[in-house]
Amino acid sequence: MKRQAWTASAATVGLLLSLNAEAHIVSVRLGDFFMGALHPMTDPIDWFVWLGLALLGARSGREAARWLVVAVPLALAIGLWIVLLSGRLPPAFISDALPLLAVGLLLASGYRLRTIGLLGVVAGLMVLRGAANAAGLRLGADLPLYVGGLMSAGYVAMTLLAALTARGIADEATVAWRRIGVRVLGSWLAAAGLMLFALGLRG
Amino acid sequence: MNIRWGACALIATLLALPASAHEQAGLIGGLASGILHPLTGLDHLVAMVAVGLWGAELGAPALWLLPIIFPLVMAFGGVLGVMGVPLPVPEVFVAGSGLVLGLAVALRWNPGLRIAAGLVAIFAVFHGHAHGMELPRAANPLGYGVGFVSSTGVLHLCGIGIGMLASRPGWQVVYRGSGGLIAVIGAYFLMRALGVLL
């Protein structure tokens, strides 16, 4: 009984002394960081292209795949920067359909890229996706925070996806069906990209 | 007591309105309609299963080349559909694909990889064209595209699965019987497309 009274007293004191929760740091000007980080998560094109790139990197070997962790965030930032300088967003059929088609075809072909080739593909596709993600930048937003959020999302996603896929498919002992599965997935992505491209051209 | 409950249930039933909880909109709506499109058209469904069955009969490399190449060729047909490029008698080709592929399975026809791939590619263009015509009207074009391509892939997988079973003793009848059934369904749709049946 005495113990319960103590607990109740402690709870009452705790309630009386409570302050406003600052858990949601949107209200302390970090909202633009989260906006940048979450924007690619709201677009399935980014999920598919990032997953495709991670698979492509994993197939190119662990040495090449490690570069993705650096190259993807940088290319995203460059893409966004280009849009800010030019003041124009790329047409959707270029920034959405082209990366999907390109990454899908590369996966479906079963071709193993060298590090330099992989970096070239990453640079091209992620600059386009970075440009597409500039659409989420609202007027008056804190630019460094938004870019930081976008780059962090790219970094985290690439690290996780590349590590998982490298473990899954890049080992020499990998069974053949996994590689076939990756090629089939690539073919599906390329097919979707091709039709989106046509739809964009049609207007 | 029971009468009261019964009356309440009757009134509630009479006053019921359609549930709109699962609105078929956005990405999920597009994905759902894309997945359902090859499944709800029996002529598409049987032809896709037949492709898988035939691939299993032809063996490697057709077995694994088929699910990689087919979606791409089908997407090419889809592009033609999206752009509004007309194809000659598309219904006849879609229906005829069921008949031809069903017969190939039933008769265990093995014309070699090139001829088989060429034949399947022609049919893929027509099937893709039919799906592509629906794309501009889809709730979400990306979702629709991914949905119908993956749904087609799963149908191939079903065919391959049945085809793999055929190598077991006694399962040949199931394999060839599936081909025969597909051919009959294909013939029915073909006659409808030609106007022989209403």
Image: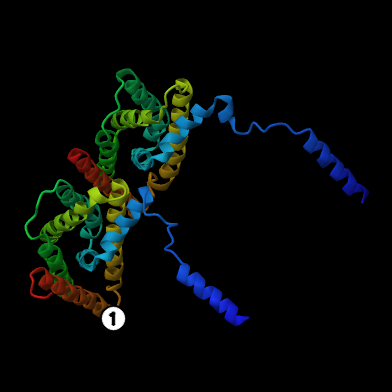
In the structure shown, which secondary structural element does the residue marked by tag 1 occupy? loop
Can see residue B110?
A: no
**On what subunit does the disc labeled 1 rest?**
B
* Residue B100 image-quadrant placement: bottom left
* Residue A83 image-quadrant placement: top left
Q: Nearer the viewer, residue B113 or B74?
A: B74
Which residue was labeled with disc 1?
Answer: B170
Position of residue A6 measured from the top left corner of the image (x, y, whole percent): 89, 43
Position of residue B50 measured from the top left corner of the image (x, y, whole percent): 21, 67
Q: Nearer the viewer, residue A9 or B79?
A: A9
In this rendering, the answer to whether A103 lies above or below A180 is: above
Q: Amino acid at mark 1?
A: Gly
In this rendering, the answer to whether A129 lies above or below B45 is: above
- Colour setup of the view: rainbow
| Mark 1 crowdedness (10 Å alpha carbons): few <14, some 14-19, many ≥20 | few
Question: Measuring 39% from the left and 32% from the top, which residue is drawn there?
Answer: A68
Among all residues in the image, which is located at the extreme top? A85
Q: Is residue A90 left or right of residue B14?
A: left
Question: Measuring 14% from the left and 57% from the top, which residue is drawn there?
Answer: B126
In this rendering, the answer to whether A131 lies above or below B15 is: above
Number of marks in the rendered image: 1
